[in-house]
Amino acid sequence: MTTVLPDENAQPSWELAPAPESTDHVNLKPAYDLFINGEFRPSRSGKRFPSINPATESTIAEITEADESDVDVAVKAARAAHENVWSKMPGAERAKYIYRIARLMQEQARELAVIETMDGGKPIRESRDIDIPLAAAHFFYYAGWADKLNYAFPNRRPESLGVAGQVIPWNFPLLMAAWKIAPALATGNTVVIKPAETTSLTAMKLAEIFQQAELPPGVVNIVTGHSEVGAAIVNHPDVKKVAFTGSTEVGKIIQRSLAGTDKSLTLELGGKAANIVFEDGAIDQAVEGIINGIYFNQGHVCCAGSRLLVQESIHDELIRKLKHRMESLIVGDPLDKNTDIGAINSREQLNTINSYIQIGKDEGAQFYQPSCPVPDKGFWCRPSLFTDVAQSNRIGQEEIFGPVLTAQTFRTVAEAIQKANNTQYGLSAGVWTDKGSKIFNLTSQMRAGIVWANTYNKFDPTSPFGGYKESGFGREGGLHGLAAYLKV
Amino acid sequence: MPTTLPTHFPTVDQVGVVERAARFTTRSIKTAAKMQGLRMVLSMIDLTTLEGMDTAGKVKHLCYKARHLHDRVEGLPTVAAVCVYPNFVGLAKQKVNGSGIKIASVATAFPSGNSSLELKLNDVRMAVDHGADEIDMVISRGRFHAGDTLYVFEEIAAVKEACGKARLKVILETGELGTLDNVRKASDMAIAAGADFIKTSTGKIKPAATMPATLVMLEAIRDHYFATGKMVGMKPAGGISKSKLALHYLIMVKETLGMAWLDNHWFRFGASSLANDVLMQFVKQQTGAYQSADYFSLD
């Protein structure tokens, strides 16, 4: 079976000229301090570390390494702001600040998108069209709830919890900050948040936006650094609520460390989502959904559709179309408007992905990558596909967090459900069929927090997001997202 | 070629198609890639006049334009074909003689297709006898909607036979088919019945060509190629009057089918005003400024 089309060499090729997004308008400081009590201030130790552009391996700016004492100052500032200002402020007043933040994000969207792409390696098309608009949308959405909490929880008198300690990952830096900060602020809590060490820059730009919005000092504090900083936030006695998005491994450590405390916790962890395609589905659109499901953001997506389950009768046809489509993906400079797949976020993550690719080959699965060129410098991984994968293969069970798809087959609906649910995770799933009854049957039996039907990776602030099993607990987004930040 | 009506037609998800089609429009086509693309666009145009008030003079002038798109710019390609009603085929053929430009003629009771098969076949034979290289037929949409798919299928096969050596373009008139599922079904039927090209529209119905409908047709062509190894051509027609949109169509062809289809033997634009917009881009490239539309001939 070949995916090469006829006379491919008979025509002169038609390659797109480079179309890089300009970086002239980006305003970055050479180094960023911590953001505590409404101002940028250095850490006690003065330590810093570089933030690298994963597409060029060059340093963009220096980030401050906080320690326990800095976290203590941040939490105390947040506690004071909660007790004296933010929890006492009427919801309608809080909403004004949150709306202002949302509008400032929109005004600065272009700069935020370029920085997000430079710092994290994701294609500008995604940061421009998805990350930044969606982050602003979360602030807009939760601003609307701030003065309506009594209606959200009828016959209750919802109260804020206090200081929320939040730790977020590197895959959607600004968007995850928005998911965490917006509902916390709307419900009257104050925040100490730690962005991921490889992608702190848009959080620091967000700190500048908080200043422009004249958000009262201490309402949001941003402390940067490595995992010790996250641990210090989680374990601080004045933190009343912990919200974490990241790996299941770290999630378990956090849950253990909170045992016996009265802190409330939400965890949004890993995933290994099944993307199930039935023979009656629209195959070409399913192929698009598979591509979008696994190669979106280089596969650095907790809800990525990383396990493809294909009905046996269409397996060969679908895989042929999938490979053909993979040939048209453009991998390279994330700032180029035509790039489909950008740079892997860090060398460490690239090593992890490559080790899983080796594991898959050793496990005997069939490996495929398109022939697209990749740049010499930087961290790159071509879109990858393993076929003939067994349910017992590690590549089909463990979260790779990279552009690696595994494909399996099934015959019956029951087998599809069984295979889809046979995983330690349960964050998301996709179903592709032309039959409405099949969609309802599957969605009600799938143990996954989000199930997409005939689409994938669609996000909206009004829709709750969260997992089953080792994918975590608690919901973010929508009305459900408010409950995690309130005593009701 | 044995022709049998397919028994299974793939389903199409409209939301997904629209989303995918929109993605092609986000490709940024600049500098050398743009000029190379525009040159391809010019060479793929079927320069068309299909009006009740067409005259011999108008057809003659159109043929001159087809050969001399804009003499002030050197080295421009000619268009692929001139497309006229059957009664102008002989004249047009004579006027493009020696240029390599093909003569396409609409036939089969264009644009509605509401006539007897006998009349439609005579229409085709007349155009072919007068020298048409290509026949653009319309399918019987009424019969299609009534569920008489076998009739539609056999009609296409009969027209194909009447075409002889002329290449057959089958116009689905996607604007009247209602759903993209129907567009896919009609595409598969036309290809199975022997179409050399499938074509979106007559240009007489709105919407004419759209990117989603064209994408569904391209997918049908690709699937046919995967199944049989045989290529079929594609012609979106009507509503494509701007260079940028035409380039997005070419990107769609490239990413759905591949470079092999980016040739006027396999891909055409049915358009009357697209050529001038492309010419305007060429002149802009040379002079650095856009000229007024009055600097480009209207033929």
Image: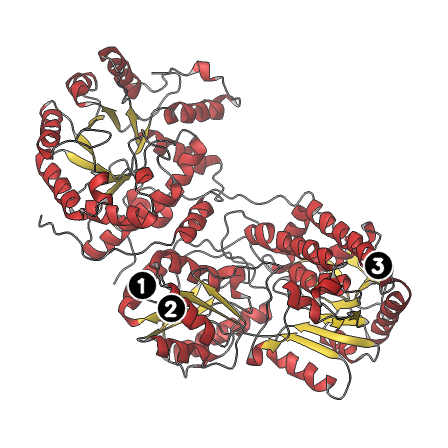
First reached walking from the N terminus: tag 2 or tag 1 = 1
CB of mark 2 within 8 Å of CB of mark 3?
A: no
Nearest to viewer (mark 2 / mark 1) = 2
Q: What secondary structure is marked by label 3?
A: loop
Residue that numbered label 2 is attached to: A438
The amino acid marked with disc number 3 is Pro
Q: What secondary structure is marked by label 2?
A: helix
Return the x and y of residue A13 as percentages of the image width and height.
Answer: 36, 44
Return the x and y of residue A223 as percentages of the image width and height.
Answer: 78, 67
Residue A246: mark? none
Q: Quadrant of residue A93?
A: bottom right
Q: What secondary structure is marked by label 1?
A: loop
Return the x and y of residue A396 as percentages of the image width and height.
Answer: 44, 77
Of all residues shown, which one is farthest toward the top? B57
Residue that numbered label 3 is attached to: A90
What is the chain identity of the residue bearing mark 3?
A: A
Looking at the image, residue A481 lies above or below residue B237: below
Q: Quadrant of residue A394?
A: bottom left
Distance between mark 1 and mark 3 Cα atoms = 53 Å
Nearest to viewer (mark 1 / mark 3) = 3
Residue that numbered label 1 is attached to: A280
First reached walking from the N terminus: tag 1 or tag 3 = 3
What is the chain identity of the residue bearing mark 1?
A: A
Distance between mark 2 and mark 3 Cα atoms = 47 Å
Q: Quadrant of residue B267?
A: top left
A42 left or right of B86 in image: right
